[in-house]
Image (cartoon, rainbow, N blue to C red):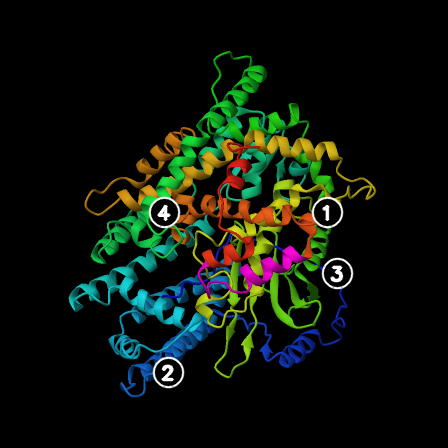
Amino acid sequence: MNLQTALLLAACCLLIACSHVGHQSPATLGSDPLGELQRRAAKYNSVIRVPEFETTPDALTNAVLQAITTANAGFDAVGRLTAAEVSFASTVRAMDDILYEAGLTVNRLGLIKETSTNAAMRDAATEAMKKYEDWAVGLDYREDVYRAVKSFAAKNPPLTGEDKRLLEDILRGYRRAGLELPKPQRDEVEQLRKDLAKLITDFDTNITKTKQAVKFTQAELEGVPASFLQQDGIKTGADEYTVMANITFHFITLMENAKSEATRKKIMAIHNNLARAENVPLLQKILELRDTIARKLGYASWADYQVEPKMAKTSANARDFMERLVTGLQPKFDAELEEFRKLKVKETGEAGAKIHVWDWRYFANVLKKEKYTVDAEQLRVFFPYENVLKGMFRIYEQIFRLKIERLEPPYKWADDLQLYSVSDSATGEPLGLFYLDMFPRDGKYNHFAQFGIIEGKQLADGRYQRPTVALICNFPPPQKDKPSLLSHDDVETVFHEFGHALHSILTRAKHARFAGTSVPRDFVEAPSQMLENWVWDKTVLDTFAADYRDPAKKIPAEIMSQLKAARLATIGSHYRRQLSFGLLDMTLHSDVSAANKKDCVKVSNEILTRVFLPVPEDTAFVAYFGHLTGYDAGYYGYAWADAIAADMATVFEKSPKGFLDASAGMRLRKEIYEPGDSRDVNESIEKFLGRPRAIEPFLKHIGIGGK
């Protein structure tokens, strides 16, 4: 029942209005676009709205206090119900309604905390979030409300479908919160969970706040593209260049291109120690608290507690899945490392050269250039940001029968913020809104994520509240003399992240608890990971990818072929690294406890070394690994979902129009996006596939399966 704020989903996306081939487009938005959308939505008994954001620290504090007061009054009413008065509407649905309204406030706070240009606002939002989270944990322990729900459940109500699922989910939540424990133990768990929530907020805030400038000479940055070095703020002296280790694309650009091993090693050591002083002790406390809570609730570990409601069901299943992949990938991983080593020998002249963790990105890039003639930096000219967005929207409009239109935001938290609407292209029904905040700035969330602001839900009056979300990204910004140019990896991220937005916006789930991306964490990435396939298809890319200096030039077919070959040639390294993170996460949440006091840095570094490559000495990668709070004991879900995504992609691969097939797109919309978690996701997957799931497409995808 504890609503945790903004959904992360590794993030970003964008849009531009495009007409719809083969469908009669509704009239475009007029002089009052938001009003027009709202009037149109009313015809479908639904609601479209933008949030009203707080603009002062006091307003943030007052907002959370008011949300708590209003919600408490609602729960008081539920708690006063007599046995004769309890019903689905007065208990189960009422609770979903109350939490939904409170969640609207905390969603805004979470977004402000991560995006406001005002440090005082970010700090105030952080403190307000702590107040909310402390209160939200306490909700699980309201005995009066629990009694009312149990009284209703005892009637064995003849519920079906989503309503039945909601009651079962709430009862499971109470059990997992410890409501079946004796009161003294229950009270202890409640306090521990409140302590944990505060620690998590501080851990996340430290990651967002930390920044580290690293200075290099031009010689130290040999090989780094001039286009990067010429960006605003990089050249800070006659022979001085300042790189921000906390900005993802800065870090990766150096890791992939800096010829100097010393430079790569230096930036990695600094990056892997970001927030170390603040977050290592916090993480140690978080892990020990989580283990203590899990054991008091009757679980062997926090990993077992967390995985129980997911597709994997047990941590043993999740761990076994990862270890099997680690073993299966070993020959390919070894072969790739040897390829990288040979390239290092050739470049350095050292016969005994070894590949270190700060080498693999660089030599993977060298391999792509030399063996596959793929230069990631040269490909950027085909992917100017605006063209990628326009092209992506045309594609998604076509396959999902949508119309995307730009609006002027009534309020902007950043100057370059954009707002768009999404409607059904055939009927004109408004489906939702999304904001785009796409480029880095000081104090902003520094990765890629979707934040839910207004989730989809059927309101008490019968109308349907359509969703509003925000995509928060950090792509290379435009320069004075050229547009923002994306790498092929960036384009893949754009397509992936817009999948999260679609998952949220296209929902038809009645209850907020099941709407959009509120699905098991080991499935939530699958629909978006599947959409990454679009950027590997030349037919798709040819619809928008062109040299911005000469739009007649498309990516040559041989380059696409080589790009795919290069991907397969380095995919073993990619997945072994991902699996090292998954096993690190699972091991920390299985093995670290208050009883054994195992050092979280030592444990994690041992896993990274065993599964991938030895870590730099005296570094603490886990201090900056934000997934440990949002995906705790759940990082395995990326690989788990990848296996599902590869299988789902076969539906498009076998369709008459491939990845541009609208009938397959509408199946995805109807069977995956619209239901959310309103039914078991296994059922949704099989309905989309038209058959049981298979692992073979994934094994082929990672180069260890058949042809």
Residue at disc 1, secondary structure: loop
Using the rendered view, name the quadrant where residue 168 is placed.
bottom left
* Tags 2 and 1 touching, CB below 8 Å: no
Any part of residue 113 in sight: yes
Q: Which residues are magenta?
A: 663-681
Residue type, mark 1 in image: Pro
| Closer mark to the observer between disc 4 and disc 3 | 3
Q: Find disc 2 in the rendering and name its residue.
A: 90
Q: How many marks?
A: 4
| Point 42% across, 49% down: residue | 627
First of labels 4, 2 by sequence position: 2
* Tags 2 and 3 touching, CB below 8 Å: no
Q: How far is mark 4 from mark 2, CA to CA? A: 43 Å
Residue type, mark 3 in image: Cys
First of labels 2, 3 by sequence position: 3
Q: Find disc 3 in the rendering and name its residue.
A: 18
Q: Position of residue 332 (x, y in %)?
A: 49, 27
Q: Find disc 4 in the rendering and name its residue.
A: 279
Considering the whole magenta stretch, tell me its main secondary structure: helix
Q: How far is mark 4 from mark 3, CA to CA? A: 45 Å
* Tags 3 and 1 touching, CB below 8 Å: no
First of labels 4, 3 by sequence position: 3
Above or below for 13 versus 191? above
| Point 36% across, 55% down: residue | 200
| Closer mark to the observer between disc 2 and disc 1 | 2
Question: Badge 2: few (under 14), some or many (20 or more) residues near its Cα, within 10 Å?
Answer: some
First of labels 4, 1 by sequence position: 4
700 or 333, nearer to the observer? 700
| Point 57% across, 72% down: residue | 466
309 or 361, nearer to the observer? 309
In the picture, measured across the screen, residue 641 lies left or right of residue 84, that is right
